[in-house]
Amino acid sequence: MSTSADPQLAVPILHGVLETSLCVDDLDSAEQFYAVIMGLEKHSSQPGRHVFFRCGSGMLLLFSAAATSRPGHIVNGGVIPPHGTTGAGHTALAMFESEIDTWRAKLVASGVTIESEVQWPGGGYSLYFRDPSGNSLELATPKLWGLPEV
Amino acid sequence: MSTSADPQLAVPILHGVLETSLCVDDLDSAEQFYAVIMGLEKHSSQPGRHVFFRCGSGMLLLFSAAATSRPGHIVNGGVIPPHGTTGAGHTALAMFESEIDTWRAKLVASGVTIESEVQWPGGGYSLYFRDPSGNSLELATPKLWGLPEV
């Protein structure tokens, strides 16, 4: 008996977010910011389209929406569906509690304006700032979500 | 000697992406989709503003840009900076190789159109589809990025 048409088919548990995306106006300034200030390891780039970084167990992908919103990008015979956003995206990157002061100092010393700091009622701490394209970035401790520092 | 003004201040290694965000047109249909079809565990929601899900070691946050792009959201005395995007965002969630067929069947049985499938030249496999707001979702194996299935 095939279960391929059964809407109740058991769904495997997802193993996490593998790719997080932000759209940026200027890929060069984004690469400089995420590599030098945020300290991420560059994976690869395609001029005018994207720059990709490793981040923990996943990837942070920065796209030019002007490029990725055009259909017709083919890889190995498969279509990469178009996407692209305008406006300020948001993502949070994980820092540990012991690193809050170092991150604050590093951002300030790098000329990054800290827009806000939040001590969460249930625990956890966030630093908010912007990338060069205006995306809302947050450095947050996992405790914000009841998660361990691993 | 203080090093707080030293631009060369060592940057701690980031511990991964803690929050991945997508903006959606309709929070109710998004909640239904991500909870029932994607099988994610709901963390919390605020009607008209957001619905949050756990996903692996981080969080997938779905926002109404109409709500989050307005300034003035305060938590515990701290400002949550405004953000919000229009257009199709993109994120990839991790599936294992052994789960590709089950996921494809589950999506089809749930009425989700698979927009594309890609066998990556360097290894790894992706299923592409859309959430109800048109965001480009991908289920991908970690091998796509040379990462282990953990």
Image (cartoon, coloured by chain):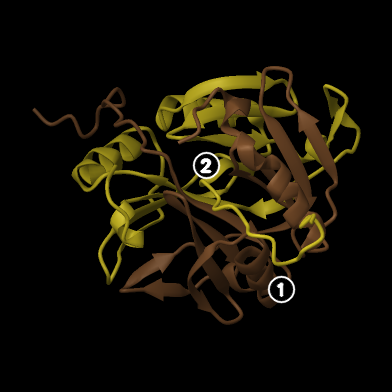
Chain colours: A brown, B yellow
The residue depicted at 42 percent of the width and 33 percent of the height is: B38
Residue B122 visible here: yes
The residue depicted at 68 percent of the width and 38 percent of the height is: B25
Q: Label 2: which residue? A: B131
Provide the secondary structure element on which disc 2 rests: loop
Residue B81 visible here: no
The residue depicted at 18 percent of the width and 29 percent of the height is: A3
Provide the secondary structure element on which disc 1 rests: helix
Residue at the farthest front position = B1
- Amino acid at circle 1: Ser
Left or right of B114? Residue A6 is left
* Position in image of residue A22 (x %, y %): 63, 57
Image quarter for residue A38? bottom right
* Position in image of residue B114 (x %, y %): 38, 50
Q: Label 1: which residue? A: A29
Left or right of A33? Residue B12 is left
The residue depicted at 83 percent of the width and 63 percent of the height is: A111
Q: Up-down: is A5 above or below A20?
A: above
Count neighbours of disc 2 (C-alpha within 10 A) and say few if under 14, some if 14 to 19, many if 20 or more.
some
- Amino acid at circle 2: Asp
User: Considering depth in this image, is A57 or A79 the residue closer to the camera?
Assistant: A57
Q: Chain of mark 2?
A: B
Q: Quadrant of the N terminus of chain B?
A: bottom right
Image quarter for residue A144? top right
Residue at the farthest left position = A1
Left or right of B146? Residue A33 is right
* Position in image of residue B61 (x %, y %): 61, 35
Image quarter for residue A109? bottom right
CA gap between label 1 and label 2 equals 31 Å
Q: Quadrant of the C terminus of chain B?
A: top left
Q: Up-down: is A106 above or below B18?
A: below
